[in-house]
């Protein structure tokens, strides 16, 4: 059975080597412009433009048609979508799956609601690639990936939650906490797939300490860590060094965030996906 992995662009993964793979873009939209979150987007220029724009900017999830198109003619499809608590992306994938399976009764689609985003989706896509490469049947992969998703987590470190607040994606309580200069929040994707604040920290050093402490609390003991940074490669690098010093032998990869995550996590933010042992 030929299988395909289809993620939405909040995974910050324009391609995945060694897999039949596609990414469907979300969009960042205001009255003046629409930014399509694909590999052609200049994230730095977008963030700069938007910081000068006075009106409201929002986002839009991929349509049913865009998911469908990305399925191509694969016999087995796994969709990996941003948390359904904050976006309609997963819902659109589920509808696309129905259309696809109706049209091709011999084909199968499994839609995964990651209850997360960004680098946790990367871990899930990488695990799917591994399970597909091992030649497992569709149903086994589905079972194994669901078990794996119980063992992955997302933490984040944010300097601003303005865009999350303006779009109603974060509770006003959290929004208020981050209004002060130099305050960072460290939080996690909750089990319901929402933003949960864990710490308010003054300064980067304390923030990173809190982040590493939470990795430990969530069961990280060395293993895969995927980091997406919003226009702050230096912070990503410092985080990598701290993780490698505390858990030697960890497999850490740091990459720039795409458009959707950069819009919401904002400049200076990092998202950290990792697995329990
Ligand atoms: O459908 C849409 O318009 C997309 C809406 C997405 C809203 C949330 C994006 C969050 C991006 C921010 C920090 C990590 C949050 C983790 C929550 C599970 C990244």
Image: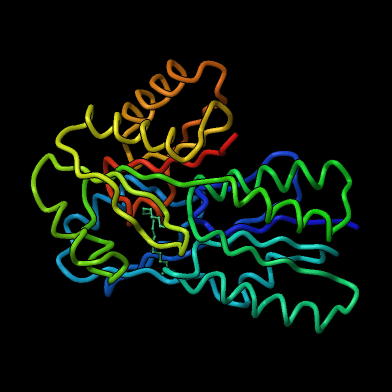
Quadrant field for ligand 1: bottom left
Where's the C terminus, which quadrant?
A: top right
Residue 66: image location, x then y, percent: 61, 71
For image coordinates 37% across by 31% down, the residue present is 212
Question: Which residue is at the front of the view, 11 or 70?
Answer: 11
**Residue positioned most to the left:** 180
Residue 229 appears left or right of 171: right
Residue 128: image location, x then y, percent: 72, 48
For image coordinates 69% across by 70% down, the residue present is 69
Q: Quadrant of residue 249?
A: top right
Where's the N terminus, which quadrant?
A: bottom right
Residue 196: image location, x then y, percent: 33, 56
Residue 68: image location, x then y, percent: 68, 72
Q: Quadrant of residue 111?
A: bottom right
Residue 78 appears left or right of 92: right
For image coordinates 16% across by 51% down, the residue present is 178
For image coordinates 22% across by 71% down, the residue present is 56
Is residue 260 shown above or below 122?
below
Is residue 201 shown above or below 29?
above
Q: In which quarter of the image is residue 98?
A: bottom right
Residue 148 appears left or right of 45: right
């Amino acid at each position: 059975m030929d299988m395909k992995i289809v993620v939405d662009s909040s995974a910050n993964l324009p391609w995945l080597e060694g897999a039949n793979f596609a990414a469907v873009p979300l969009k960042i939209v205001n009255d003046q412009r629409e930014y399509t979150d694909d590999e052609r987007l200049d994230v730095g220029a977008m963030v700069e433009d938007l910081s000068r724009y006075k009106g409201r900017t929002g986002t839009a999830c991929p349509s049913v048609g865009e998911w469908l198109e990305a399925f191509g003619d694969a016999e087995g499809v796994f969709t990996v979508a941003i948390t359904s608590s904050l976006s309609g992306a997963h819902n659109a994938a589920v509808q696309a799956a129905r259309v696809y399976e109706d049209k091709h009764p011999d084909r199968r689609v499994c839609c995964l609601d990651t209850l997360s985003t960004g680098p946790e989706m990367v871990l899930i896509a990488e695990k799917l690639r591994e399970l597909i490469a091992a030649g497992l049947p569709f149903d086994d992969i589905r079972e194994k990936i669901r078990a794996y998703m119980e063992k992955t987590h997302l933490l984040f470190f944010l300097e601003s939650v303005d865009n999350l607040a303006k779009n109603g994606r974060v509770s006003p309580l959290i929004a208020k906490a981050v209004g002060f200069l130099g305050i960072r929040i460290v939080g996690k994707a909750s089990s319901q797939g929402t933003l949960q604040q864990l710490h308010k920290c003054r300064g980067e050093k304390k923030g990173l300490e809190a982040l590493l402490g939470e990795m430990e609390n969530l069961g990280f003991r060395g293993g895969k860590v995927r980091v997406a940074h919003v226009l702050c490669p230096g912070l990503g690098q410092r985080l990598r060094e701290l993780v490698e010093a505390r858990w030697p032998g960890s497999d850490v990869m740091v990459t720039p965030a795409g458009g959707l995550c950069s819009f919401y996590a904002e400049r200076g933010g990092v998202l950290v996906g990792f697995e329990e042992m």
